[in-house]
Image (cartoon, coloured by chain):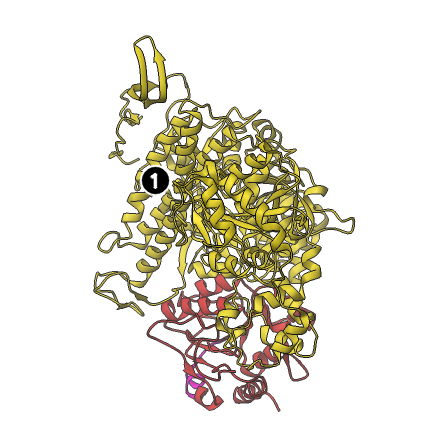
Chain colours: A red, B yellow
Amino acid sequence: MVMKPVPWQTGEICGPESAKSLTKPDVLKRDLSKAKKLLLIVGSEAPDEKHGKGDMVDYAIALSKAGKMDVIATGGAIKAFIEKGFEGAKTMGAMELAYRLQDPEWKGPHGRGPYDMIMIYGQPYYMQWTMLSGVMNFAPQIVPIALGRYFQPHAKWSFPNMKEKQYHTILDEILELVGGGK
Amino acid sequence: MDDSQPYYGAMFEGTSPRTGTDFRMKKKAYFKADEADTGLGKFKGLEVRIGTIVDDEWDEPMGPTPMPGPTTLRSWDHKILTKYQPSYMPYCQVCCLCTMGKCDLSGDKRGACGIDIKGQQARIVLAAANIGCAAHLAHSRHLIDHLIEEHGPRTELMQGPGTEIHAPVTRLVTGMRPRTLEDASLILDYCETQMTHTLSATATGQEGSWMDFESKVFHAGMIDQLSMEIADLAQVSTLGMPMADPDAPLVESGIGMMDMDKAIILTIGHNIVPAASITDYITEKRLNDQAEVGGMCCTAWDITRRDPKAKVVGPISWQLRFIRSGRADVVVVDEQCVRTDVVREAKKVHAPVISTSDKAVMGLPDRSDDPPESIIKELVSGKIDGCYISDHSIVGEVATKVAIALKPSRRKMKFFPSKKAIQKMAEDCKKCSECIRACPNDQNVMEAVLAAQTGNMEPLREVYKNCIGCARCESACPNDYDLHSWMVVAGEADCEDEKYMVRTGRGAIQDTEIRHVGQPIVFGEIPGVIAHVGCANYPSGGDDVHHMAEEFAKRRYIIVTSGCAAISMGHVRDENGQSIYERRSGAFDAGCVVNVGSCVANSHIAGAAIKIAAIFAKRNLRGNYAEIADYIHHRVGAVGISWGAMSQKAASIAAGFWRLGVPVIVGPHGSKYRRMLLGKADNERDWMVYDARTGERVPTAPGPEHLFYAAETVAEANVLTAKLVLRPNDTGKGRSIKLSHYIDIHETYYGFFPEDIWKYIRRETDIPITLKDKILAQMKENKWKERKIPDPTLLKEQVIGGGA
C-alpha cells in the first residue's frame, strides 16, 4: 500500500492542481463550518464494500442523517438504499451529476440545492476521477471531498491511499465530526 | 445553407439549388491495362484518363448540401449542440502541443495561444475523431486502390439483393450513387480533403471555439461513416462476402475452437486483403487439412465473411492470451488495434510475425521484394523474428508454408509455467499493490497472487474472466512476473471451453426489411433499435454485452451489432449450449440479432436509419443531410452502445451517429473520452420543436435525453437505453409500449417506479394500460397537462410552406 497522496491508478496523474491529503478529520472542520448545503454522492461499488457491521450504503445513510445531507446514488446504487428502507436518496447518472453540478443555481433532484460541498465515493476509480475533474474545473463554487479509500487528485480533500483498517476508522471519525456515530 | 459551397475539382459541378442554376454530377474516367490490343495498335503499360462521365440518369433532385465542407452543416450541428451541450471533464489541465507551452489552463486561465480549457478539451476530442476517421479512411483507401488494381476501376459495386437504395450514407452526404470502384475512389478523394481540413483545425492558431471544434468533430464523424460505407461496399462487391444476407453463415469462434492438429495462422486487425490471401492460398493448394486461419478483431469477421471455414478467435482484448498460449504458429498483422508489442510477444513463443500494412510495420525488415522461398527460409530458421511484406499476393504462401513448417516443433514446446511453478514464484510477491494500481479495472491481482502461494488458483481465474488483456500489471510488477500468463494458466479450463457458434457479418440491411419494420419503428411499436458496437475494453468482462443484448432482444427490440462487441455477444451459451446467434434470427426485425460485420460495416447501421427516412417517409436522400438527420433524431428510436469503447475509432464512429442525432452510450471507461453530450431534462426550452404542420413552437418530452453518455454500470445502461429510444414522434401505442419497458427495466434494476413517467405522457393514450392508476396519480401530483403530438422538427425550413 502506497499511503501517499498520489493517484491510485498510476497513470491517472492530473494537472497543476491536486487534492490535499486527508489524514485527520479535523482538517475538514473549517470547510464544513462554511458549507451551507451538502450533497453526498454514492456510487455503484458502495453496496459491495464492507464498513463495520454493514456496508458503505449503511455508512451513507448514517452520514446523511447526521450531516443532514441529501443523497444521490449513481449507477444503480439506489436499489440498495431502497432495500434498506431509506427513502431520502435520489438516483442520477454520474455523468449527469458532474454536468449539473457545474450550474451554480442547480437545485438537484431533491429541490434543496444549490450545493456548495459534495462528499463522494463508490464509483469506479477512474470514473470518479473524471467526474471530479469536471467539478474541479467548472464548478469552483463547490468544495469536493472524496471519501473513497484511494487518492482522488481532483478533490479538495482526499485520503492518501489508506490501509483498509485505518480508512474505516477515519470514516467513523468523520461521521462523528458531522454529528453522528457513537 | 452556406453560399460558399466548396468546389471539389471535376468531381462535383453545379450550383446550389437555392440559386436555381443547372448542376451535373461529373467524374473522371480512368483506365489502365498492362497490355492492350486495340484498333489503334498494341499498347504496353497503357493508362488512360479521359474527360468526364455525367451521371444524369438519377432523377432524384439534388438536396441542399452535396459534399458538404467543414462549415456547411454548422447550423445543424449548432442546433444539436445547443440541445446537448458538452460536459467536459479534462483529462489534464495543461496543453503541451506547442513550444509556447506547457500551458496551465486550469480555472479560467488561457494558454499562450489564447485557448481556454473548454476549447482545449474540444480540440482534443476533434484530434481523436480525426485519428479514428483517418484509420478507417486509410483502410478504405488501401482497399479501393488494391481492388481497382485487382479488378479494374469499372468493377460494379453491389450491396446485394433487396438493396435498391445501396450506399445510403454516400447518397446522403455526397449526392452521388457510387456504382463502380472508380466512383468509390472519387468519394474517398472528397473524404481525404475533408479530413485534412478538420485535422488542420486542431493546429495551434486555428479554431478557438469549443462549439466549432465540436461541429468539426461531427464533420469528421460523418466523413468516417462515409469512408466506412465505401470500404464495406467495395469488399462486399468484390470479395465474395454475404450480401445483405440475414442467413449469413454461423462460424466457429473461441480459443477452444482452434484445431491444434493443424498449423494455426493468426490474423489480427481490420483489413481483409492479406488475410484473404492466406485463406485463398490454403483453399487453392487444398491445404485445409493441414492449416487453418483464425482472426481477432475485425479481420476475424471479414475473413469469415469471405471464407466461413476460417474462425473467429476472439475480441481484441484476447490478443495477448492467444499469442502467449503458443497456439498460433504464425501471426499476421494488418492494421488497427494490433498490440504494438506483438513482435516481442510472439518472439517469446517462437512464432514469427508478418506485418502487411504500411501503417504497422512494427520495426520488421522489409522483405517485400524477396522471393517467397527465401523469406520462408529465414522465418522458419528463426533468423528473423518476422518481416514486413507489402505484396499481399505472397503473404498467403509465406504465412501458410511457415506455419506448416513450424508446427511440428512448436507443438512440442510448452509456453506457460505450470501451476506448481506459479505457486513457487508467487511466494516472492512483494505485496506492493503495484499490479492493482496498474489494472484499468482495479482487479485485485495481488490478492490473487497471494492466494496462488497456497495453490489456490481460483482468484487468478476470476481475474482472467474480467481481464482486458492489457498486461499493465506485468509492466508494473517489480518481480517481472508474467501475471497475465498466470491468469491464463489459472483459467486454462475456461479457455479450452471457449467454443461458440457466431453468425458472421451479413452486410447491409435490405430495403424490403426496412419496408417491413419502418412503420413500427417510427410509430414506436417496435420499441427501438439497439446497436452494440465497438471495442472490448469492458469494465467487467464481455458477458455484459450479451446480457444487455439479450435483455432487449427478448423485449422485441431489434439488436444490431458489429466488431468486437459482436464477438463478445456470441461468447455466452445458454442452458442448451446455444449462443445468441443460434437462438435468434439474423434478420432486421423485432427480437432478432443482426451482425452486420466488422468496424466498417457500422455504416450499415447508420444506413438502416437513413433508409427508414427514404423508404417509409419517402424523403429524398440525395445531398440532404440536415433534413434526414432531423428526421432520424425525432422519429427513429435508435441507440448505439459501445460498452467497451476504447479507441479513437470508436470516438469517430460515435461522432457519425451524433450528427445524425442518434444517442450513444459507452461503458464507464468511456468517461475518459473527457466529454459527454448531455441534455437537461428539466429545461423545457431545450425540448421545444417546430410543429412542421403549423410552424408553431411546441414543447416535447426530453427524448432522447442525452446524445453521448458514459454509464457506470450495466444497470444504468439498461435503464438509460430504454429511455433513450423515446422519440417525439411516437404514436400513443408506441409511446405506451416504450414506457412499459422503461418502467419494467427501471423497477428491475433500480428497484422503484420511475418518477419521470408523467413527463412522457402527452395524451392519455400514451399511458400503459396496466399501470394506469399509478401513472395517473403521478400525473396529478405533477399537475400534468395534455400536450399535442407535433410533427417535430428543429428545422424551420421543414415547416409546411417553408416556415415563413
The image shows residue B782, relative to residue A165, as above or below, that is: above
Placement of the C terminus of chain B among the 4 image quadrants? top left
Give the residue type at disc 1.
Answer: Leu
* Residue B224, picture quadrant: top left
Query: Is residue A31 on the magenta stretch?
Result: yes
Query: Is residue B467 on the magenta stretch?
Result: no
Residue farthest to the right? Answer: B576
Q: Residues within 10 Å of mark 1 (few under 14, many from 20)?
A: many
Nearest the eye: B204 or B491:
B491
| Residue at mark 1 | B73
- Residue B613 location (% of width, % of height): 50, 32
- Residue B42 location (% of width, % of height): 32, 14
Secondary structure at badge 1 equals loop
Nearest the eye: B34 or B704:
B34
Nearest the eye: B332 or A18:
B332
| B764 to the left or right of B676 | right
Start-end of magenta stretch: A30-38
- Residue B358 location (% of width, % of height): 38, 45
The image shows residue B521, relative to residue B443, as above or below, that is: above
Placement of the N terminus of chain B among the 4 image quadrants? top left
* Residue B59, picture quadrant: top left
Q: Is residue B727 visible?
A: no
Q: Residue at x 58, y 37 (%)?
A: B282
| B372 to the left or right of B189 | right
The image shows residue B79, relative to residue B469, as above or below, that is: above
- Residue B99 location (% of width, % of height): 22, 63
| B502 to the left or right of B370 | right
* Residue A92, picture quadrant: bottom right
Q: Residue at x 59, y 65 (%)?
A: B485
Q: Residue at x 65, y 76 (%)?
A: B423
